[in-house]
Image (cartoon, helix red, strand yellow):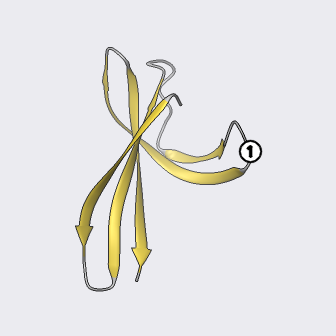
């Protein structure tokens, strides 16, 4: 993935929800699934559920939704 954006979705009394939009290459398009991501500088790895969103001339976009308990 070569880009990302964070946006607020909604806040409720017990949770905050936001999503991260990642940009990757136009092809291949990844299917909706859990993927292992790795930070390039630290080599830390974690799993994240991604689903394809829209695409444009710069690449394919994916969303990951986060729900934080207060």
Task: Return the residue found at the far top.
Answer: 57
**In the image, residue 53 above or below residue 47:** above
Q: Position of residue 44 (x, y in %)?
A: 73, 49
Residue ID at (69%, 36%): 40
The C terminus appears in which quarter of the rendering? bottom left
Report the side of 41 relative to 67 (left or right).
right
The residue singled out by tag 1 in the image is 42
Q: Secondary structure at mark 1?
A: loop
Q: Position of residue 39 (x, y in %)?
A: 67, 42
**In the image, residue 61 above or below residue 13:** above
The one of 62 and 15 positioned closer to us in this rendering: 15
Q: Position of residue 19 (x, y in %)?
A: 36, 54
Residue ID at (47%, 46%): 50
**In the image, residue 24 above or below residue 35:** above
Task: Return the residue found at the far right.
Answer: 43
Task: Return the residue found at the far front.
Answer: 41
Residue ID at (66%, 53%): 46
Report the side of 55 relative to 38 (left or right).
left
Report the side of 32 relative to 15 (left or right).
right
Q: Position of residue 33 (x, y in %)?
A: 53, 46
The one of 42 and 53 positioned closer to us in this rendering: 42
């Amino acid at each position: 993935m070569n880009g990302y954006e964070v946006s607020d979705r909604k806040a409720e009394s017990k949770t905050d929800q936001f999503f991260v939009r990642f940009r990757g290459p136009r092809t291949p398009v990844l299917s909706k699934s859990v993927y292992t991501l790795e930070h390039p500088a630290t080599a830390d790895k974690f799993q994240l559920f991604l689903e394809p969103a829209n695409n444009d001339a710069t690449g394919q976009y994916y969303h990951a939704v986060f729900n934080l308990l207060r």
